[in-house]
Image (cartoon, rainbow, N blue to C red):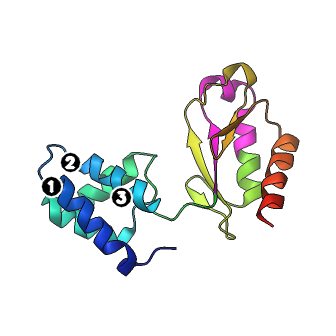
Amino acid sequence: MHDYDNYKQKIADILASHESMPGNLLPILHAIQDSLGYIPEKSVPDIACALNQSIAEIHGVISFYHYFRQTPPGKNTIRICRAESCQAMQGKALEEYVQKQLNIDWHETTSDGQFSLEPFYCLGNCACSPAVSINNEVYGRVTPARFDAVIASYREAAE
């Protein structure tokens, strides 16, 4: 996990490299998340100050876009497709099952740091709904039993 001293200079460098760019807030947020894996809460005042914006404005943008994280991601990122085809094929039930099994909600990470859960709007696997991706590997026709089997293989690989 990152601490303030470890990422403060990296964020300062990102802010400096984007300072003259018009509409620089989103590119800055993307650069920070690409570099650290998330946008640390303690970095928000620095971003606001550099852009002459309020902390509330920065928080508003971060919370509006589902892509941005404010907590470190797990080793494995699970994305569940929430598009219409997957929803029509029991996707909502799968979402609830996965959240219960992992004991986390959207944008959270399991207590062991192994899995993060993110909603996704179309994995492009509509013919095999519902779809889930783990670390960008897509799985189709995912049932609770199939999810359990796939997750078990990731847990075994971690041991």
Q: Amino acid at mark 3?
A: Ile
In the picture of the structure, the residue carrying the numbered disc 1 is 19
Q: Amino acid at mark 2?
A: Asn
Q: Residue at x 46, y 74 (%)?
A: 2
Q: Which residues are magenta?
A: 76-95
Q: Does the CB distance between marks 3 and 1 fall below 8 Å?
A: no
Q: Residue 121 is drawn in which quadrant? A: top right
Whole-number angstrom distance, CA of label 3 to CA of label 2:
12 Å
In the picture of the structure, the residue carrying the numbered disc 3 is 32
In the picture of the structure, the residue carrying the numbered disc 2 is 24
Q: Does the CB distance between marks 1 and 2 fall below 8 Å?
A: yes
Q: Nearer the viewer, residue 49 or 28?
A: 28
Whether residue 88 is situated above or below residue 55 in the rendered picture: above
Q: Secondary structure at mark 1?
A: loop
Q: Residue at x 79, y 52 (%)?
A: 151
Can you give x and y, in whole percent of width and height, for residue 76 in the image? 65, 55
Q: Amino acid at mark 1?
A: Glu
Residue 148 appears in the picture as rendered: yes
Sequence-first tag of 3 and 1: 1
Sequence-first tag of 1 and 2: 1
Q: Does the CB distance between marks 3 and 2 fall below 8 Å?
A: no
Whole-number angstrom distance, CA of label 3 to CA of label 1:
14 Å
Q: Residue at x 20, y 56 (%)?
A: 17
Whether residue 33 is situated above or below residue 111 in the rendered picture: above
Q: Is residue 98 left or right of residue 121?
A: right
Q: Residue at x 70, y 53 (%)?
A: 99
Q: Nearer the viewer, residue 61 or 134?
A: 134
Q: Is residue 125 left or right of residue 14?
A: right
Q: Secondary structure at mark 3?
A: helix
